[in-house]
Image: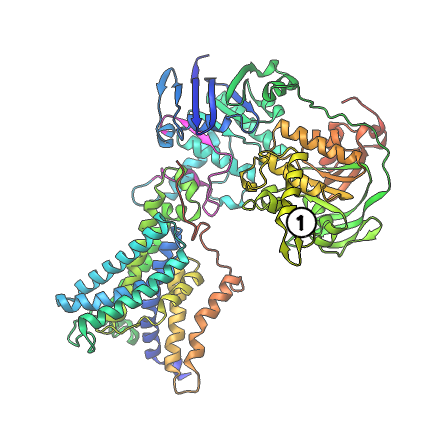
Amino acid sequence: MSVLTNPQLWASTLAMTVPLALPAIGGTFSERAGVVNIAMEGIMLMGAFFGVAFSYWTGSAWLGLVFGVLMGGLLAAVFAWAAIRLAADQVVLGMAVNIFASGLTAFLLNTLFGYEGTPPDTPPLPFVSLPWLGPVFSHQSVLLYVMFAIVALSHWFLFHTRIGLRIRAVGENPLAADTAGLNVWRLRYAGVIVGGMLSALGGVYLSIGILNSFDVGMTNGRGFIALAAMIFGKWTPVGSFLASLLFGFSTALGIALQGQGVSPDLLSMIPYVLTILALTGLVGRSTPPAADGIPYTPIR
Amino acid sequence: MSSFLEVVDVHKYFPGVKANDGVNLDVRAGEVHAVLGENGAGKSTLMKLISGLYQPDAGEIRLEGRPVRFGSPRNAIRAGIGMVHQHFMLIPALTVADNIVLGDEPGGIRYKRRTAAAQVRALSQKYRLEVDPLARVEQLSVGLQQRVEILKVLYRRARLLILDEPTAVLTPQEAEELFQVLRHLKAQGTPVLFISHKLDEVRAVADRITVMRAGRTVATVPAADASPQELANLMVGREVVLRVNKPPRTPGDVVLSVRNLSVTDAERRLRVRDVSFEVRAGEILGIAGVDGNGQTELADAIAGLLPASGGQVAFLSQDITRLPPGERTRRGIAYVPQDRQRDGLVLDFTLVENAMLRDVSHPPFSRRGILQHRPARAYTERLLEAFDVRPRDPDRHAGDLSGGNQQKMILAREVSRDPSLLIAVQPTRGLDVGAIEGIHRQLLRLREAGKAILLVSLELDEILSLSDRIAVMHHGQVVDIVPAETATREQIGLLMTGTRVGESEVAQPSNR
């Protein structure tokens, strides 16, 4: 039981939550607009790599963040164009984006930085210490607090703004939205690109938020756990965050229990088991947006 | 009264088709004007011209005397044209208010949800279209969903309401409520343009009726002066037999016998309670009732698509209660399902593929697991010929056919298997007068041939004119079974509400 009372466990739970919650909310934006997005893994890699690269080249971690997010948004825009304009199969496309990003970042790492990897003097994003909130908050990346803001803002945006209502409308019934005078394609682009930028921010967190380097495949499947968190969170920002918190906890617990006879592999299965349960309706059924994954061709 | 909307000699051509070939229409302020015509007469094209989806190739559309060219639906909406589509343009997961204000929401960046609900509430009171603004659309009945559609159009300040086949999805009660709403709108000065192929409802609700046939408007008549026979002839362009001629027949042996059958649906609700009846050879048993009183479930249970939770189904004196649907088919039960596009045909398959669907696993359509195209094709061509399915092209996809021809195709397939029992659930739903006539003739021909027929229909007139006996269902129970010769509309209507009439009244023959 001493494991559970150790503040280190809770601090690392929060640290593990950030790179899940950001892409999970990103995926939520995309799917609420009606585009199935399983490309979070690849888009995170883009964010992670270009975050480090621009941080090194410009000497500013903040500029690294901006460019990392922009490059993620760019890849998401290409994905969106193929998915929306060309009406390509979104699942196949998402997988292609993942493979492309994993190849591209590995290639660029080697070509631009050589076998040594990213330079050790790359500036990372600052850590923030709020000891008065308790030991859990004594040493956390600034992006943890950014994430809290994003959770709240995303919820407000999707459920309390006019454009949020419209994004949800095109994800549910694009034909109805079209006859009501909405621009379905533009709203879907917005959802996918904003979602891509949030996923990329999750990648930036991994490379210059808690480290200051990039490794090949460093996202390590987090984009897919984020997908699970999005589903388990019922396609809502707050739900995605809470599911990420649960999955972050199971990861942190796995690390804490290492050497105590419990296999961390067993704990890392939890997100997927929970997702299957959620989809089959055993723990509160998850229903995706009605038009999720269906390309829309306007009438006329 | 002055004209609100005038359509003057409008033509619209598509490659190979004269969709509108001389259309004249004049909707006056404060009237309900109906456009009546068969499927394919050009009604939908006309509506799309008026609502800005199409531009006319020739002719003119005038709004309050001024010529207009809309260019897009948005412009038409702005000019006050409000279109209620046949297939609802609603988002089930959102609330009523969200759906109504979508695209024109109150608020700046923030969506003022409460203001929206208040506006919707005020609107629904003004037009007496009661609906809870905060309910989710998916929780509403079809009739209420249609109200939401109408409110959506009124919210955008429509000055002309166009309804495309609005009663196709409604129960008779909901249709009557809709007519009340339309009369109220008229009283408030909003003209209504009402598109339909149903004679009765057009006469019930419209002030004037414009009849379309083959892309042209053939006549505009005051509804009060128009007889159904006259309208039907105008629509079809020839004498139509509205009453079917049914020679008397003595029923033969019992083909289907249902004893104390109970059925629960997929959500485990009891839909059919303790129902017993039999159908004999050469007899049509009509099942009447308001939609959703267990008729569909009863038909499904006899076809084997729903399990019986109690009781027994016997076919040709053998118990088939536990048999799978395929085995029932082999023994001679044919089934024309309610939703022809979902359950009756594979729309993406050709007519040949659809024709052999039931018997694909044995000769002549397949040998040792290999499909035999030539016999299947020849068979399909025979079906298309015998049942007058158009176009007569076996390679066309089922989805390309009109509703009437799809239904003929299903009937052709089912009947050609020489069944002993045909179960037909709403076989003429959504069809036009000409197609209905054809389907009715086929059903009577089967009766002549000594088949047993179970006919489920929501159209009381259809039940009354085709059936030999009528079983009326209410809340899953058969309230009564009466001979059709002596049955009246009023009597059946009363039974449909679950009220049983005294024996003496039932025995009283009356002329319908």
- Within 10 Å of the Cα at label 1, are there few (<14), some (14-19), or many (20+) other Cα atoms? some
Q: Is residue B102 magenta?
A: yes
Q: Which residue is denoted by mark 1 in the rendering?
A: B358
Q: Is residue A134 magenta?
A: no
Q: Is residue A203 left or right of residue B312?
A: left
Q: Is residue A38 above or below residue B30?
A: below
Q: Is residue A184 left or right of residue B355?
A: left
Q: Is residue B428 above or below residue B321?
A: above
- Look at 32% across and 75% down and name the residue there: A12
Q: Quadrant of the C terminus of chain B?
A: top right
Q: Quadrant of residue A200?
A: bottom left
Amino acid identity at mark 1: Arg
Instruction: Give the image's coloring scheme.
Output: rainbow
Q: Quadrant of residue A50?
A: bottom left
Q: Chain of mark 1?
A: B
- Look at 46% across and 12% down and name the residue there: B1
Q: Secondary structure at mark 1?
A: helix
What's drawn in magenta, residue-wise?
B78-106
The total number of labels drawn is 1
Residue A245, percent from left and from top:
38, 68
Q: Is residue A255 above or below residue B506?
A: below
**Residue A280 seen anywhere in this rendered image of the structure:** yes
Task: Tell which of B115 and A26 is nearer to you.
Answer: A26
Task: Tell which of B326 and B342 is nearer to you.
Answer: B326
